[in-house]
Image (cartoon, helix red, strand yellow):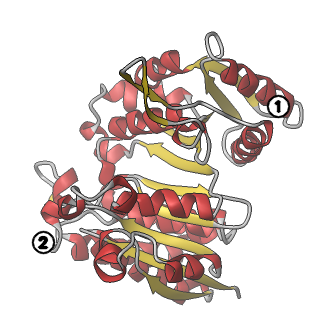
Amino acid sequence: MGVYKIAVLKGDGIGPEIVDSAIKVLRHVEKLSGHSFELEEGLIGGIAIDQKGEPLPKETLDLCLQADAVLLGAVGGPKWDNLPTSKRPEKGLLQIRKALDLYANLRPAKVYEPLIQASPLKEETARGTDFIVIRELTGDVYYGEPRGIFIENGKRVGINTMRYTEDEIRRVVKKAFEIAMKRRKKLTSVDKSNVLEVSGLWKEIVEEESKNYPEVELEHLYVDNCAMQIVRRPSSFDVIVTGNIFGDILSDEAAVITGSLGMLPSASLGERYALYEPVHGSAPDIAGKGIANPIATILSVSMMLRYSFNLEKEAQAIEKAVEKTLEKGYRTPDIYSEGCLRVGTQQMTDAIIKSLEEVWQELY
């Protein structure tokens, strides 16, 4: 059986609570499967600023560089909002993504049948939605140079540069095709090639890579049209791949149609390293109250098992356990509806573990 080393960064707000829940589920997977997970904690975000004076201490980065995968909670909160941009908790996230070269961000958007009424879309539109947005994460306008605010002719001018190299595009596109091959073999590439030269290069490289994956059905959409189609026909998508800024926007749109950010995991992948975290933030207003939804972080662990450790059976078991728990009517406050069983973080975690045992016995 395998032994896997995980760096655990709980972060701020509800981060410690939801990560503890995910670890509890992971320990149960360990018990059922016989695999071993070695966990070591580090500081990131606001708590790192308080204790070490910076959002990503060197010892935390070193810990991550020595691990097989990183599990992150959430960072930030009003306590640190007035700090300079370079010292804010969120800067730690940008730093770790760049340092680990995490170039592909994966955000699934799945509408669970027991929660379909939570979607803002009509049930017949939302039903069957199960796609993943793959966002290039280390290039584009967030990192391109030149950037900044300058004075020209006595007036302020803000500049950010949309820039991509061929290699940056090719590696994330290749990753998207590989993931599509393991899903329903459909890939949607999103760009703005009718007006942006950088998008023209993106589209060219997608077409070149598609020749290596003839089984995958490929479609190209302009980003504005894709934003509309995600609302009109979300169940028709399988894998969407796009650049950093477009992916930032589209993945948030996709998150809304599922009904709750508390349900959505994510993965940030590189060639050697990977980081897994829930999509939602640190929710400082409910921190310590025991009511945070742990499902997104638990599902982030299932993504870790799949993409970092190739433990597909274990990943599916967690996902089926979550769905089974929802079918039983368990709901944290963010997804509660009348007639369901309102529970807190720990009760939801325990219910998922019980369902995990049932799923494991049924399938394995």
Mark 2 crowdedness (10 Å alpha carbons): few <14, some 14-19, many ≥20: few
Residue 134 in which image quadrant: top right
Q: CA distance from mark 1 to mark 2?
A: 49 Å
- Residue in the picture at 64% in, 83% down: 4
| Residue 309 visible somewhere in the drawing | yes
| Residue 320 visible somewhere in the drawing | no
Inspect the image, locate mark 1, and give the three-letter code of the amino acid beneath it.
Answer: Ser
- Residue in the picture at 49% in, 30% down: 235
Q: Which mark is residue 44?
A: none
Q: In the displayed structure, does residue 218 sit left or right of residue 52?
A: right
In the structure shown, which secondary structural element does the residue marked by tag 1 occupy?
A: helix
Note whether 307 is above or below 254 in the view shown: below
Residue under label 2: 289
- The percent position of residue 160, horizontal first and vertical second, equals 51, 32
Residue under label 1: 210
- The percent position of residue 133, horizontal first and vertical second, equals 55, 40
Quarter of the C terminus within the rendering: bottom right
Please state the total of marks drawn on the protein image.
Answer: 2
In the structure shown, which secondary structural element does the residue marked by tag 2 occupy?
A: loop
Residue 309 in which image quadrant: bottom right
Residue farthest top in this picture: 194
* Residue in front for this viewpoint, 205 or 265: 205
* Residue in front for this viewpoint, 340 or 166: 166
Q: In the displayed structure, does residue 178 sit left or right of residue 287?
A: right
Q: In the displayed structure, does residue 331 sit left or right of residue 231?
A: left
- The percent position of residue 173, horizontal first and vertical second, equals 73, 39
Note whether 78 is above or below 160 in the view shown: below
- Residue in the picture at 35% in, 63% down: 89
